[in-house]
Amino acid sequence: MCEDNQTQVPVFLLLGFRGLYHLKCLLFMLFLLIYTSILCGNLLIIILVTTIDHLNVPMFYFLKHLALADVLLTTIVMPLTLNIIIMEERIVPIAGCLTQLYLFTISGFVQCFLLSVMSYDRYLAIRQPFRYTLIMTPNVCLTLVSGSWFLVFILASSEFVIIWHLEFCGLNYVDHFFCDFGPVVALSISYTSLLTTMDFYLAINVILIPFVFIVITYILISFTLINISSKTGRRKFISTCSSHLISVCTYYVTLMIVYMFPSGEDSVNVNKFRSLLYILGTPLANPIIYSFSNHEIRAALRKVLKYIIITH
């Protein structure tokens, strides 16, 4: 409960990029350009995979859901961030702030499971090519994707049952451009040790375990690569796995930069820009990675562009 000289706060004040508002026009245009590029790139992948017949295979089905998670992750944060940049700060109801944190957690963590599902798909395609179509049926693909979303939903909800019951009194300034876990929980007067411990174990389940699974699958895949003597076979392996492997590296490197190497309290703006690596970097990189590294995506894109040119 709040003390006598404190009142329970109904709203948070997001300070955004305090101290950088003399650059707000530049920041707004830069973030708007990146956000638009993320939307266009990922929505293009979703449309191509949905409409082009020869992309109707498990690998691209999983890629479509990864692109969807990227769109959701960025859209949950960036419209509010752009508004904060223009207004220089933004008042957000506590319920709205916690909802943003909840959705951000789900859309971010589900990418770990989707990347691990994609690594399993690559493992089957290379290690068991003759059984691949028998194992990776449409029902199995749907189960893997829906199971990933459902598992993250259950794990995140168990933590947010506690977060929704936190008490916030007195200070309501969040020195960030969105409602991130650390800055929000730090404002609570409630006992948060259990919550931070739960968050630690949640991170192990949804970040570390999928990462270990991905590493193991690629170790097993590498054994197959060693036994491939022909250059054609090696090129096929590289074209099959390179896009996914680069995407995994990009995702986990940004996570490590943001969460494993935090800045001190005197470098709040540094932490904000590190968060931008995760929120904007990976969603922007994935369409570029798959567009340049995957010839099926490039062929589908050329087909669509050719159709647009002919019809117009």
Image (cartoon, helix red, strand yellow):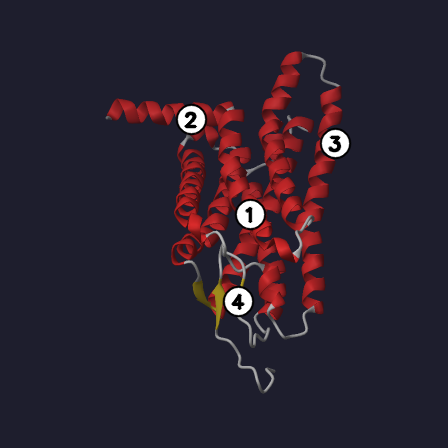
Residue picked out by circle 3: 219
- Single out the mark in the foreground, 2 or 1: 1
Q: Is residue 116 visible?
A: no
Q: Earlier in the sequence, mark 2 or mark 3?
A: 3
Tell me if 30 is positioned left or right of 144 in this view. left
Residue 300's disc number: 2
Residue reaching furthest to the bottom: 4
Question: What is the distance, in whole Å, between disc 2 and disc 3 at their CAs?
Answer: 31 Å
Q: Residue at x 58, y 76 (%)?
A: 167
The answer to whether the residues at label 2 and label 3 have Cβ atoms under 8 Å apart is no
Q: In the picture provided, is 214 more to the left or to the right than 41?
A: right
Q: Nearer the viewer, mark 4 or mark 2?
A: 4
Which residue is nearer to you in this view: 131 or 164? 164
The tag on residue 173 is: 4
Q: Earlier in the sequence, mark 1 or mark 4?
A: 4
Verify CB contact (< 8 Å) between mark 4 and mark 3. Answer: no
Circle nearer the N terminus (1, 3): 3
Q: Position of residue 192 (x, y in %)?
A: 67, 70
Mark 4 and mark 2: Cα distance apart in space: 48 Å
Q: Position of residue 98 (x, y in %)?
A: 52, 65
Q: Please tell me whether mark 2 sits on a helix, a strand or a loop.
A: helix
Residue 206 percent location from the top left of the image = 66, 51
For the point 69% across and 38% down, the residue is 214
Element type at mark 1: helix
Q: Amino acid at mark 3?
A: Ile
Q: Count how many numbered circles sit on residues in the image.
A: 4
Amino acid marked by disc 4: Tyr
